[in-house]
Amino acid sequence: MFTSKAAFTTERASGFLQQLCKHFGHKIDVQFDAEAGMIKFPFGQCNLTADQDVLTLTVSAETQADLTKACRVIGNHLERFAFRENPKLEWKPVVTT
């Protein structure tokens, strides 16, 4: 399993979490509330958490290629939704032991 994580500092963390989940929920399985969400892509999964001013995205996939694709899909959508804030996501690998 491959995992990467990114954080986006914004006063609208919960709003963006819900917007992403509602958007993808039209086509794929999602679960969410104001503070946490999960989006299940055919090629991976994204877990989202919204604290007061930080949206944290954790993406997992079976292969590095799928991880790259899932990060790109989530990142592109967040950039579109949050264009006024110009998010620059830095995906960092998560090492599990």
Image (tube, helix red, strand yellow):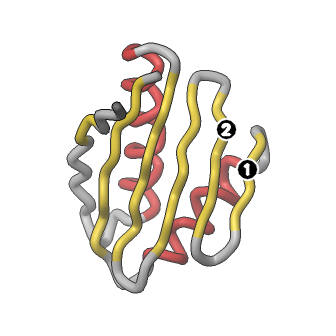
Rendered view: 34 above or below 6? below
Q: Secondary structure at mark 1?
A: strand
Q: Which residue is mark 2?
A: 40
Residue 30's tag is 1
State left or right for residue 13 relative to residue 14. Answer: left
State left or right for residue 16 relative to residue 40. Answer: left
- Nearer-N-terminus badge (1/2): 1
The quadrant where residue 7 appears: bottom left
The quadrant where residue 10 appears: bottom left
Q: Secondary structure at mark 2?
A: strand
Rendered view: 10 above or below 96? below
Coordinates of residue 62 in the picture (x, y in percent): 51, 18
Rendered view: 18 above or below 60? below
Amino acid type, label 1: Val
Rendered view: 65 above or below 86? above
Coordinates of residue 41 in the picture (x, y in percent): 64, 32
Front residue of 57/83: it is 57
The answer to whether the residue labelled 1 contacts the one labelled 2, judged by CB atoms less than 8 Å apart, is yes
Identity of the residue furthest to the front in this view: 97
Front residue of 39/78: it is 39
How many discs mark residues in the rendered view? Answer: 2
Mark 1 Cα-neighbour bin, 10 Å: few <14, some 14–19, many ≥20 = many
